[in-house]
């Protein structure tokens, strides 16, 4: 496991992010609070936790889909404006900082465009040569037939490849993936995980990988944040956190993962140790 | 034998290959049997065959017996009784099984009166069942509506509903897949207790081989409508024999022992539009030989218990997930 070079300025720096929502009966729900981390260029950070723990809120704040109540996000030392800027150039520049891939690419892909058109549209928008499209399709493992297919003519795994290719078309510095492999068959999930490792190695893009699946996070990230009820209960190098969890909640998550010799009753016991 | 499926082949009109192809599978009372495979492999169809809720115009050969009764021959009242009393099914999404505007208790009381209890007895029994499935304050749960409960609590309610008719066989189709891991563990611990207390047979359907191997007594692995491997669960981790089972293990990320490289299986799981002239796994299999594409698949018994549907079985090493060519 490599530790980040001490002097290298972090590519992505997140400090004290908070988001609360007003509750119908008064009072506020803290969806995320005190979220602080950095990711170096080419690094990979995992955010794990159960449903409702605040993972997706953090991901959506990173890309600007949710406005934080407090805290800052900067990419390559430049703070991101809290709102989407007005000018076209500024908007595009912001999109080139962070791109996002969702669990279900179906909703984020235009049903009328073929895979190649989807990419050439994104490339044109960002002033890049549309000839790059074929290279991108090839990079994510989509062939000649898929290039001419529309989203409904692609399998779930192929659609996820296309969503990743479209995000890469923007040439982003950071790729945020929210449960991006959760809905895929195991054999296809493995292909996408391998693809992400290759992309990271070849392009130096940094990954923020949001997932409920500890084994996947173990596989694809260097650092990890464990979230529960909007806060980070534990944070550190993935291998260390998963091998020697300090927080009882992290221990509960680990005890819940099926493996040889596993007894689900152990997880029930571990639950009792958490507040 | 509680559930005994023998050489079951099911064909749907307009498809290139059978949905199920020569499937044989058994579940004894008190046994937890895993059924694993990727989407479209035929897991849910196998469960539907046990309930006989198959699409119209399905052409079936082979047999499905539950407690000795020939399920495919059932009609009328006997079929209704089979579905309402002998076998119960729990699906992935508990919300789809519950009416959002009715109270939890009404859902259970309706199930219970359907088995012949009077209203008052059914009410008492419903509260007992909510307690049995580990819900705190069952009297209060009885009066609550589905939106007031979490997904894990609702799945407990659905399990309580499934137990209402005291079935012999419980079919759980991805019943814990949508739940958080910690909740999944709790539901699995519950199902294990119920199985022991009631000598229920449990057919546990999941896409997660690690989960099935860790939780079940015996596991069947399906691919393209066929059972490709059957083994006592413990053997799957140590000695997977079919190349597809090995591939599934080698491509699943795991915790512990450093970071093992995951080796994807090339290609994609087949659909019903894909026809095969031989072994269905041939074009994704690292061990395939030209003869595999014309071989008529049949299960080959393993040294210990179980079987694997692979013509190269005697020649292939039986030990662990040895490194494969990564294509
Ligand atoms: N009612 C139906 N009509 C047509 N095809 C169906 C029907 N039900 C299931 N199938 C098809 O049968 C195959 C096996 O499905 P299923 O048993 O649901 O697999 P699994 O549960 O392993 O995902 C799939 O290709 C599926 O699309
Ligand atoms: S029969 Fe041939 S192609 Fe099929 S699983 Fe065995 S080795 Fe692979
Ligand atoms: Mg299914």
Image (spheres, coloured by chain):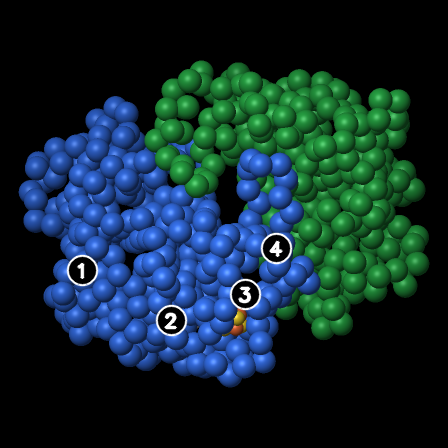
Chain colours: A green, B blue
Sequence-wise, the earlier of marks 2 and 3 is 3
Q: Which residue is mark 1?
A: B1
In front of the other: label 4 or label 3? 4
Query: Mark 2 and mark 1: span between their CA atoms?
Result: 21 Å
| Disc 1 and disc 4 on one polypeptide chain | yes
Residue at coordinates 25% horizontally, 57% vertically from top-left?
Answer: B27
Disc 2 vs disc 4: Cβ atoms closer than 8 Å? no
> Residue A173 sits in which quadrant?
top right
Mark 2 near ligand 2 (CB under 8 Å)? no
Query: Mark 3 and mark 1: span between their CA atoms?
Result: 32 Å
Sequence-wise, the earlier of marks 2 and 4 is 2
Secondary structure found at label 1: loop
In front of the other: label 3 or label 1? 1
Q: Which residue is mark 3?
A: B269
Secondary structure found at label 2: loop
Disc 2 vs disc 3: Cβ atoms closer than 8 Å? no
| Disc 2 and disc 1 on one polypeptide chain | yes
Sequence-wise, the earlier of marks 4 and 3 is 3
In front of the other: label 2 or label 4? 4
Q: Nearer the viewer, residue B192 or A12?
A: B192
Mark 4 near ligand 2 (CB under 8 Å)? no
Q: In the rendered view of the protein, which quadrant contains the N terminus of chain B?
A: bottom left
In front of the other: label 1 or label 4? 4
Residue at coordinates 41% horizontally, 72% vertically from top-left?
Answer: B19
| Disc 2 and disc 4 on one polypeptide chain | yes
Where in the figure is residue A216, as x and y percent of width and height?
59, 41
Q: Residues within 10 Å of mark 1 (few under 14, many from 20)?
A: few
Q: Which residue is mark 2?
A: B299
Q: Residues within 10 Å of mark 4 (few under 14, many from 20)?
A: few
Q: Which residue is mark 4?
A: B323
Residue at coordinates 51% horizontally, 61% vertically from top-left?
Answer: B317
Q: Residues within 10 Å of mark 2 (few under 14, many from 20)?
A: some
């Amino acid at each position: 496991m490599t530790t980040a070079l001490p002097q290298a300025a972090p590519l992505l720096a997140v400090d004290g992010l908070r988001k609360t929502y007003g509750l119908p009966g008064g009072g506020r729900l803290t969806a995320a609070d005190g979220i602080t981390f950095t990711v170096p260029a080419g690094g990979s950070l995992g955010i794990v936790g159960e449903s409702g723990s605040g993972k997706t809120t953090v991901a959506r704040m990173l890309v600007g889909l949710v406005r934080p109540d407090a805290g800052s996000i900067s990419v390559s030392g430049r703070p991101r404006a809290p709102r989407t800027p007005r000018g076209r150039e500024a908007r595009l520049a912001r999109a080139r900082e962070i791109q996002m891939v969702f669990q279900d690419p179906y909703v984020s892909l235009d049903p009328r465009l073929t895979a190649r058109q989807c990419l050439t549209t994104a490339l044109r928008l960002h002033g890049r040569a549309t000839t790059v499209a074929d290279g991108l399709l090839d990079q994510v493992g989509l062939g000649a037939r898929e290039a001419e297919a529309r989203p409904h003519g692609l399998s779930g795994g192929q659609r996820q490849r296309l969503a990743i290719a479209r995000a890469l078309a923007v040439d982003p510095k950071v790729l945020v993936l929210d449960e991006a492999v959760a809905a895929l068959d195991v054999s296809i999930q493995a292909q996408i995980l391998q693809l992400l490792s290759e992309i990271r190695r070849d392009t130096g893009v940094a990954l923020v990988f949001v997932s409920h699946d500890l084994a996947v996070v173990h596989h694809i990230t260097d650092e990890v944040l464990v979230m529960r009820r909007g806060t980070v209960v534990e944070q550190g190098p993935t291998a260390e956190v998963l091998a020697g969890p300090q927080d009882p909640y992290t221990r509960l998550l680990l005890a819940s993962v099926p493996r040889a010799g596993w007894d689900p009753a152990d997880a029930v016991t571990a639950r009792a140790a958490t507040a | 034998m509680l559930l005994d499926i023998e050489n079951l082949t099911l064909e749907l009109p307009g498809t290139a290959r059978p949905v199920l192809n020569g499937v044989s599978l058994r579940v004894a009372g008190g046994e937890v049997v895993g059924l694993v495979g990727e989407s479209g492999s035929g897991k849910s169809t196998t469960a539907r065959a046990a309930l006989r809720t198959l699409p119209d115009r399905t052409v079936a050969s082979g047999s499905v017996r539950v407690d000795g009764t020939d399920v495919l021959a059932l009609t009328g009242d006997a079929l209704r009784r089979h579905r309402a009393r002998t076998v119960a099914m729990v699906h992935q999404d508990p919300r789809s099984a519950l009416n959002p505007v009715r109270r939890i208790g009404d859902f259970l009381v309706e199930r219970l009166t359907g088995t012949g209890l009077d209203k008052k007895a059914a009410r008492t029994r419903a509260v007992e069942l909510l307690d049995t499935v580990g819900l705190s304050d069952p009297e209060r749960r009885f009066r609550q509506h589905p939106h007031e409960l979490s997904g894990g609590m609702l799945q407990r309610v659905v399990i309580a509903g499934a137990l209402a008719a005291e079935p012999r066989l419980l079919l759980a189709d991805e019943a814990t897949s949508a739940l958080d891991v910690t909740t999944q563990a709790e539901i699995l611990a519950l199902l294990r207790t119920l199985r022991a207390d009631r000598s229920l047979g449990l057919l546990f359907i999941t896409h997660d081989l690690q989960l099935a191997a860790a939780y079940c007594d015996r596991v069947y692995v399906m691919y393209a409508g066929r059972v490709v491997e059957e083994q006592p669960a413990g053997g799957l981790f140590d000695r997977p024999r079919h190349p597809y089972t090995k591939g599934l293990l080698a491509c699943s990320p795991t915790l512990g022992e450093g970071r093992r490289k995951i080796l994807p299986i090339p290609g994609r799981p087949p659909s019903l539009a894909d026809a095969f002239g031989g072994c269905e796994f041939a074009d994704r299999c690292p061990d395939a030989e030209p003869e595999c594409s014309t071989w008529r698949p049949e299960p080959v018994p393993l040294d210990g218990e179980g079987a694997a549907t692979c013509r190269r079985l005697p020649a292939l090493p039986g030990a662990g997930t040895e490194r494969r060519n990564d294509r």
